[in-house]
Amino acid sequence: MATPIYVLGGYQTDFARNWNKESKHIVAMMREAVAGGLEATGLEPKDVEVGHVGNFAAELYAMQGHLGAFLLDIDSSFSGLPTSRHEAACASGSIAILAASAEIEAGRYDLAMVVGVEQMKTVDPKTGGDFLGTAAWYETEAKGIEFPFPKLFGRLGDEYDKRFGLKEEHLAHISAVNYSNAKRNPLAQTRNWYMTEDHARSTDKFNTIIGGRIKVSDCSQVTDGAASVFLASEKAAKAYAKKRGIKLENIPRLLGWGHHTAPIEFDAKVAESRDNPYVLPHTRQAILDAFRRAGVADVWGVNAIETHDCFTTSEYMAIDHFGLTKPGESWKAVEDGTIEMGGKMPINPSGGLIGCGHPVGATGTRQVLDAYKQVTGQAGDYQVEGAKKVATLNIGGSGTTSVAFVVGC
Amino acid sequence: MIDIKDVVVLGANGTMGAGSGEVFAAGGCDVVFLARTVEKAHEGLVTAQNMAKSARIADRISVGTYDQDLEEAVAKADLIFEALAEDIELKKQFFTRVDKCRRPESIVATVSSGLSIAEMAHGRSDTFRKNFLGIHLFNPPHVIVGTEVIPHAETDPKLIPSTVEMLETRFGRTAIVTDDKPAFCGNRVGFKVLNEVAILAEQYGVTFIDYLIGPYTGRAMAPLATIDLVGWDVHKAIVDNVHVHTKDEAHDLFKLPVYMDKLIDHGHLGNKTPAHGGFYRRVKEGKQTINLALDPRTGAYKDTRENGLRPLPFVEKIRQLHRVGKYVEAMQLFVTAEGAEADLARKVIFGYVSYALNRVGDKEVVREPRDVDRIMGFGFNWVPPTVLADVIGVKETIKAIERCGLPVPKVLAQAKPGERLFREAHVNIGRFFAA
């Protein structure tokens, strides 16, 4: 990238918490993410020049809009802070990061705070499923349909099946790997849950079909959570490094980004990609753009991936779209252990959306934070040894808004 | 780290037996569920499946009876896990049988929540005594990760850290080592507070005291509702045991209130006896469920909507501050709030901090403040005592403890200015303060 954007760190809340049971307002979650991020980075509130919030649907889940303004409630030093809120369904957190980095690139600000946040456990699962349906074309794809998104991502699996063939066992393995990784992540929602590959393969009263080929074990979680990330210009990063006696080159950067949007309806996406080797070519392009801007020749130029596994089918798609295999051959990377911890390209060391959890508007921010933790050796028990560069892929809707980053030094 | 593969659970039909068995099976062990009958053992297996939310956990579980299968299963086991009723004579009978057929290197553990580990080991073979300890999981084990490891004087010293490591890394527990003292650490500290609140309920009323020492003081559930959940019989067993066998600064607070003793005799055991209830009772009136609360002075139950409970301004303000995540301001208000009710709430809460941290020391129940913090945080879902001290400020906490006329724990008296006492990196302290 022409203008470097430095990542100074951040903070993730414990995704196992139920903030509704704690009787908490969404601002409590934002406050913990910001306070934790300030402490983790050693920044003072007065250092922050601009605030960006990524959030999907607080108006529905928490009857609250205008989340940017809530940043001012967190610290009196934020008085007058310019803030905004960004929405692109499950990609909201990444869009907030893109907006913050664009402002730094434009020279408007030197230090930006990004907070991704979603409170989802305020409603029953069916109502929540309906709210999530607004990330699709609600009237044509979600209205009156129980759990529309599992059905849409089930159709992504169907499309793979039609074009290349798809075996359920590979999806089950993806689920088991994410749950297994999450056991090593002390902030993962499912860290104490029971899951085995046998369970993921079974269909019974405990692992029911939610829609099409998607079962409970194929789904990401309904999660309350927030994640903050602090971004800096070269000028601010230099001052930050000097103050702490660290080398500027040891502070990770957003080395590259990619951002594309596909038609919102799933049928339109499939129709558009009929003659393309990739099922979701705009997602593929977002990844390629991030690699190109980062100066990374291909996927083997990164050491790990944090991808959007809202369902096992989306991770299956990500595997070939990242270029780990030829199109339609994702199963090879599933079968040979490539995607596992210790494999050639660990995917979702954090546990991903299936294991770590999926607070919709926070996910993109959480992915970049996890990438930061990996490249700075701070990922603890889920550290990918020697990780220098980590790629992220965050998707809103049924493969609609795709944002990819490469984070590294 | 010890490597265990085969586990036998005695008493696998009970909640703790089935739940513990689920934890071991989920960690990859092959587990034999034993009970008096195969049907009972199978009930435990179904409980384990419901806890795991998976039918497939049964792939690692087999069932059997004490009469038919105990000897063979125990002979094969790496860990024999006793989860029978809290009756020391019954436990000892089974340990006699186990001692005769176990392999010398196998580990034998009891899930007892407070009976003497040394007494259970007494009279057993050398290898039994060496490999015997308490592994106290909390209810329900698949949700509550706090776990106490309790050696007795003859437990192999090497076994203790390796058991802790195994429980943490393989079974996802948050484990501490406690001394073999009545009720160990978590229940000693927790039931001191619970019984104190039960005593106060007689004077102040059930709904008022549960409101005053409610979730806003740093717990997931109000204290008297917690006793109903645990069961009055269990509560009585724990506090009686501590009251008889210990003598510390809170001795009188372990004396079971007379009204509870009487009601227990009449079958009021809390949630497990819904017809009688405990502090609370739910009754159906047509399609409506009515919540009733006990009047400890008369033994009658009254509709909670007619209890005349008026919200206290300081409690409501603290709850509102918690709701928006301002925990420091909230708990500082807790310290400065005026009035008899605030004084009473502080007496209980600073009593908790004082009593908990005074159980730390060479001759006490645990060695480090971290131990009592972890078991209260992850066994009870209560705010760890040092979190309260950090949030309120150590100096202010000491002053508040002194104002209540309680002993100031060494860890607070010796804290350096500005030192943070609670240092569990991944724990969100906000989770302990419900609004």
Image (cartoon, coloured by chain):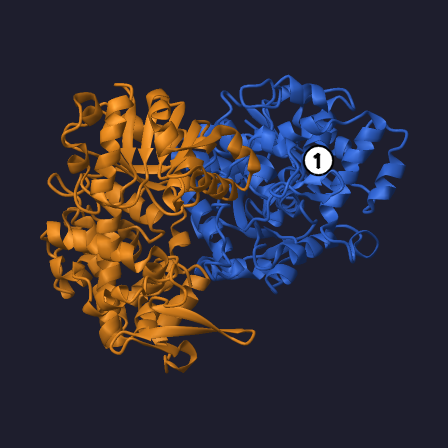
A281 or B301: nearer the viewer: B301
Residue pointed to by mark 1: A314
Q: Residue at x 49, y 33 (%)?
A: A373
Total labels: the figure holds 1
Q: Residue at x 67, y 23 (%)?
A: A295
Residue at the front extreme of this rendering: B67
Give the color of chain A as drawn.
blue
SS category of the residue bearing label 1: helix
Residue B106, image x and y in percent?
29, 22
Q: Residue at x 54, y 26 (%)?
A: A409
Q: Compared to B434, does A155 lie above or below?
A: above
Q: Is residue B128 left or right of residue A96?
A: left
Q: Is residue B328 left or right of residue A149?
A: left
* Chain letter, orange: B
Residue B146, image x and y in percent?
34, 42
Q: Is residue A397 visible?
A: no
